[in-house]
Image (tube, rainbow, N blue to C red):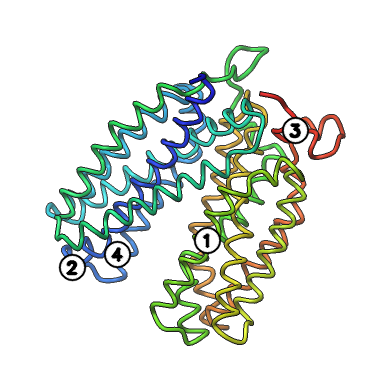
Amino acid sequence: MTPLTAAARATYLVFAGCGFLLASWVARIPQLRDHLHLEPAQLGWVLLGGAAGSLVARPFSGPILARLGQRRTVAITGALGGAGVVVAGLGDVAGLWVLVAGLLTIGFTVSVWDVAMNVQGAEVERRLGRSVMPRFHAAFAAGTVAGAGLAAGLVALRVPVTVHLSAVALLVILAVPWATRDYLPDEPHDEAAGRPASPLRAWREPRTLLIGLFVLAFAFGEGAAGDWIGVALIDGHGAAAAVGSLGYAIYLAATTAVRWFGAGLLDRYGRVAVLRALGGVTIAGLLLFVFGPNLVVALAGALLWGVGTAFGYPVGMSAGADDPRHAAARVTVVSTLGKVASFAGPPLIGMVGDHVTVLRALLVVAALQAVAVLVAGATRPLRAVRAGDDDRAGSPSHQGA
């Protein structure tokens, strides 16, 4: 096995491990809520604490990555993320504040982990010479399915939350640092000075900010799907609860399938053309979902919505990391702006939904997708931008291994 093949395998494993860890504790939220006797509002604030830890960590991800390097950053944050899951599991018996401490640890460490593994994924993609970042994100989705599926089985077997989450964490703590041994070495950050440039510089780069806006729009679309598809189907289309869950399952299946099987489209047609086309597919899917005359049409809309949003986040990460010398700082900016969607999305849709129904409020997602289509040109590979060539001339498939 070549070092590049080993690095790709390690990257798949790290992405899957991250999804597995996160889905495992999320799947036990109902038991944590019941055992700690949390009211809905209390649970909301507890979960917001974890999200806050994630958002706060994003701006620090670039400097941490520049200091520790990709391999050490992922190994350390993977282990600490696992420790946070152990603490969250202990919260089931030790109380609310232990749970909050665990969620803050998970939020902070996994946020840095996310940036670092995307930077490594972009480097592997660049060396392979073809678009594989969507497949890495499909591996993350596969990890979430495995984590949720295992959790469902253990809940049925009445395995205690603490035992379940401790076992999951131990597996991740062992597997992720082991996988990072095969990571590719970091590229030099600044060829002239031999040290990383100021991480603040990326926040003043128009291209980086536009990519961040693009990712925010797509992340908003993904987050809205997770939060509101079921509610919109039930309240807006009169669906049964099971059909509401089915709608989100259809969305997830479509997104994962396109990420795994459709990455070659990026190499054939170029980032910008594919992303603009998929933005159009997302808008069409949302219009069918919102205005469809029956459930079959609405579910078809959910499928197109999933197809359309599949590439936004992973390709945005690749675009931010086009220049390996500044990948950490730029991916930090892009992912931070994307993370804002997880804060802004649920309350914005909810507030608009109070006035026009949740179903109609999802037109906000369509409007943001129109913005994403307009700014998608910012994702054009840097070589193509500098040379003034066609988009495909700078795509990974034309850059060599």
Select label 3 or label 4 by which is in front.
3
Mark-to-mark CA distance, 1 and 4: 18 Å
Are the two marked residues, 3 and 1, in contact with CB atoms closer than 8 angstroms? Answer: no
Mark-to-mark CA distance, 4 and 2: 9 Å
Check disc 1 and report the residue beneath it: 344
Numbered mark located on residue 37 in the image: 2
Q: Residue furthest front?
A: 1
Circle 2: residue type: His
The 10 Å Cα crowd at callout 3, few under 14, some 14 to 19, many 20 or more, is: some
Say which label, 4 or 2, has the lower sequence index.
2
> Which of the two residues, 175 or 283, is positioned nearer the viewer here?
175
Circle 3: residue type: Leu
Q: Element at badge 4? A: helix
Q: Element at badge 1? A: helix
Picture residue at 63% right of the left edge, 70% below the top = 364
Say which label, 3 or 2, has the lower sequence index.
2
Mark-to-mark CA distance, 2 and 1: 27 Å
181 left or right, relative to 262: left
Mark-to-mark CA distance, 3 and 4: 44 Å
Residue 86 pos. (x, y %): 22, 43
Check disc 4 and report the residue beneath it: 43
> In what quadrant of the picture does the C terminus appear?
top right
Numbered mark located on residue 325 in the image: none
Q: Element at badge 3? A: helix
The 10 Å Cα crowd at callout 2, few under 14, some 14 to 19, many 20 or more, is: few
Q: Is residue 108 above or below residue 158?
A: above
Say which label, 2 or 1, has the lower sequence index.
2
Residue 349 pos. (x, y %): 53, 71
Check disc 3 and report the residue beneath it: 382
Q: Is residue 187 above or below residue 308?
A: above
Circle 4: residue type: Leu
> Which of the two residues, 287 or 55, is positioned nearer the viewer here?
287
